[in-house]
Structure formats: structure tokens, C-alpha cells
Amino acid sequence: MSATDHRGRMRVAITGIGVKSPAGLDAESFFARLCSGESTAATIHRFDPSDLSVRIGCEVPDFDLDPYVSAKEARRLDRVSLLGYAAASDALADAGAIGADPARSAVVAGVGIGGLITLEEQIQTRLEKGPSRVSPFLVPMMMANATSALVSLQLGWRGPNLCIATACAASTNALGEAAELIRHGSADVVMALGAESCMTPTAIAAFARMTALSGRNDDPEHASRPFDADRDGFVMGEGGAALVLERWDAAEARGARIYGELIGYGRNADAYHITAPSPGGEGAAACMQLALDDAGLDATAIGHINAHGTSTPLNDAAESEAIRKVFGEAPPPVTSTKGVTGHMIGAAGAVEAIAALLSIAHGIVPPTANLTRIGDEIQLDVVHGTPREVAAAPALSNSFGFGGHNASIIVAPAS
């Protein structure tokens, strides 16, 4: 089988996955929860949210850090880095003995905000106890690139080490740029990941002031409802997700299990508004078309779409219009996993790419949770109620971020 794609570039195999999400701490439990359609949203328990107008979120359950870092190391790492590194460590173990040259092994992380928990805590420390009590570890803990740096340090990988901070599109961009490193010969293996943990009192207050969050404090399990007529905002989530990308020929040579292939990547900008999507989803539509062109596919080849689907009025309507522009009047089945996980910001794209891969592997698309009455402006075949059986075919996954950042990837069955 050819080691290069239709453009003569190195093919990109996906050989390992790791997940630390509100829906599960491993791929099997994560996908099972998605298929159940049961939301993970609840009242925030990590801090007291009682004085906030929005008091709900999708938090990652506690897990044992001992397999990943020592207690001393953990105290010097923000939660975003712990979640990202734990997912990356699981993904590497899942991939098996890669044996690649460390100088040609890269890390690309997508992080939207970074170490906000540590920053907020240390601001409080300064205000209450004075500047001399601020932690000397604050800077390396709060840096957006702290997660990619940690993964590179822990793995000993000395190739390109990049952090992409394109808001909610960050880890889809990370996956796409990771694939580009392999396609063009800059790396043989890349750990591509997304991580985010920005559920702090100030962040929740700020997003609420933007009217971006759902206010269903008394009914959190039904708060995140992508594409539903009664959607009123997203639910904040957190987590880490990682995928090991390898040169296809190297993965085949070592007999690796290949989950699938990353065959298409599109990225562009709306250049319209700092938070709102471009009217009619023009930027998103162009981005999806770029991914199709990159993969050398016609729109009819796509088996299903994992939508950005945030549960906000503007985003879901614009994405629906964008999908119709690209796929016509009979688009493929569409799902949004954010009804279960909430919106994991910088980690969203990576965790949703894993969901798309597992959908291909299992032949089923998880339902969009909490969708009871589809919005009149949503002219899509949105999977809801129960999982949908689908044939093995390429899947498209979308991520669109504040600032007008658009990113789409296409993953295909291993063949």
C-alpha cells in the first residue's frame, strides 16, 4: 500500500488515543457515555459557585495522578497541564513501542486559555498576603505553552514543540498542523493534543456576562442542548485528549494498530467579529471545503459530521447554514457531543476527533444529547435520541473559535 497520498505527501496514521474528559477517563468509557446521550453537567463542585449567576459545568472526575506525575510535580503544574499530560501518556501507551528518533518526534498542543486556575489563585494570594508570597512557579504554570512543554520534557521528544492558542479551534488546529509536520517530512511521529481547565469563578462570571453560557442552574443535565430550539448557551467543560500521529509506512512496518488516517485539513479566518461567527457561516463553509479539497474528496464521500455545535443560538445557526452551503440539501448525519461533555474550549477539537474516529470504528454515531425540538433554522439531519448506525466512511470534525478562527479535519477508516 502506498506510503503517500494523492498529492505525494506522507500519509498520516493515527495509532494512539488518550482521553481525560467529563464523559470518561479512557476511550471505552468515554464513547459509551457519548452513546448513552447522558449529560455530565452538574453544579460545580471544585469551588463554591453560589455567588455566580451560572453555577454549572462539566468537570473531569478525580483520577489517580500517581501513574503520571509525583505529588511534588503535581503541585508545580496547573490542572490544564495535568489533564493534557495524562491524556498524552495514555495515548503513548495505547500506541505501543513507537521507537522513533526523539529528534524527529514532535509535540503540538492546542490550549485556548492556559493556566487560569493558578493565575487566579495567585492573584488572590498577592491581594491577601502580599507580593512576596506569590509562587515562583506561577509563570511556568500559567503559560499557555506549559502543556506542550511538559509533554516534550516528560517524553524526551526533541522535535518541533508547538502550542496553538486559537481559542475553541485550538486542538483541531493542533491536529492539522501535526499532520502537516509528518506530511512534509519535518517529523516522523507527533503527539497532538488539546487541554483546557479554565473553570474558575472569574472565567465563569466573564463568560456569563457575555451571555455565552446556559443559565439552567436548576436543570444542569439539560442545559447543553446543541441545535435545539430552546438552546440558550454552552456549558463550560474541561479535559485533555491526545492522539499519536505517525508516518503511515512506519506504523505499518511496526505492526501498529491504526485507528484511522488524517486525510484532510482546512483552516481559515472569518475576519468578521471578535466573538460572533460570520453571517451565513461563510467562513466555516470555506473552511470545510478546504478540508475536502485537501483530502481530495467530494462532499458526498463524508459519512458523518461531528459538528462544533456549542448550544449557542448564533453558532449552531451559522454552522447549520455553512454545512448546507457545502453539502447541499441532503447533508450527511450530524452530531454534537457537547450535549454530553459541555464545551471543553481548547480541548474540544481533540476530544471530538477521537469521538469521530471511534464512531467510524464502531459504525455508530452518538446522539446529540438533549435535542427534543430542533430549531427551525437548523436544516440538518441531526442524530438524536439514539445512536445512528453508519457505514465506514470518512468523517469531518469542525471547530470554530472566538476571534473568527475556523478549523476542520477529515479522518478516514484505516485501509
Image (cartoon, helix red, strand yellow):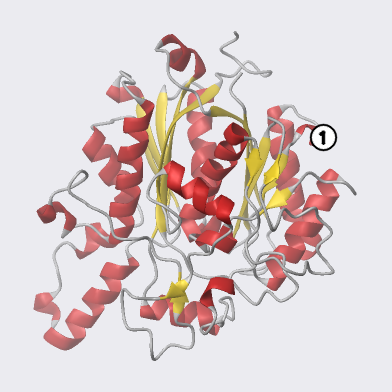
The percent coordinates of residue 294 (x first, y second) are 69, 31
User: Residue at the location (56% across, 37% down)?
Assistant: 357
- Residues 166 and 408: in front is 408
Quadrant in which residue 360 is drawn? top right
The percent coordinates of residue 84 (x first, y second) are 35, 49
Is 58 rendered above or below residue 192?
below
Quadrant in which residue 277 is drawn? bottom right
**Residue that mark 1 sits on:** 300
Is 139 rendered above or below residue 286?
below
Quadrant that contains the N terminus: top right
Is 117 rendered above or below residue 352?
below
Q: Is residue 265 left or right of residue 189?
A: right
Residue 278 appears in view: no
Disc tally is: 1
User: Residue at the location (35% across, 23% down)?
Assistant: 104
Residue extending furthest toward the bottom:
51
- Residues 244 and 374: in front is 374
User: Residue at the location (49% across, 13% down)?
Assistant: 249
Mark 1 Cα shell of 10 Å, populated few (<14), some (14-19), many (≥20): few
User: Residue at the location (39% across, 45% down)?
Assistant: 26
The percent coordinates of residue 162 (x first, y second) are 39, 42
Quadrant that contains the C terminus: top right
Element type where label 1 sits in the image: helix
- Residues 177 and 90: in front is 90
Is 298 rendered above or below residue 130?
above
The percent coordinates of residue 34 (x first, y second) are 55, 52
- Residues 361 and 356: in front is 361
Quadrant in which residue 55 is drawn? bottom left
Q: Amino acid at mark 1?
A: Thr
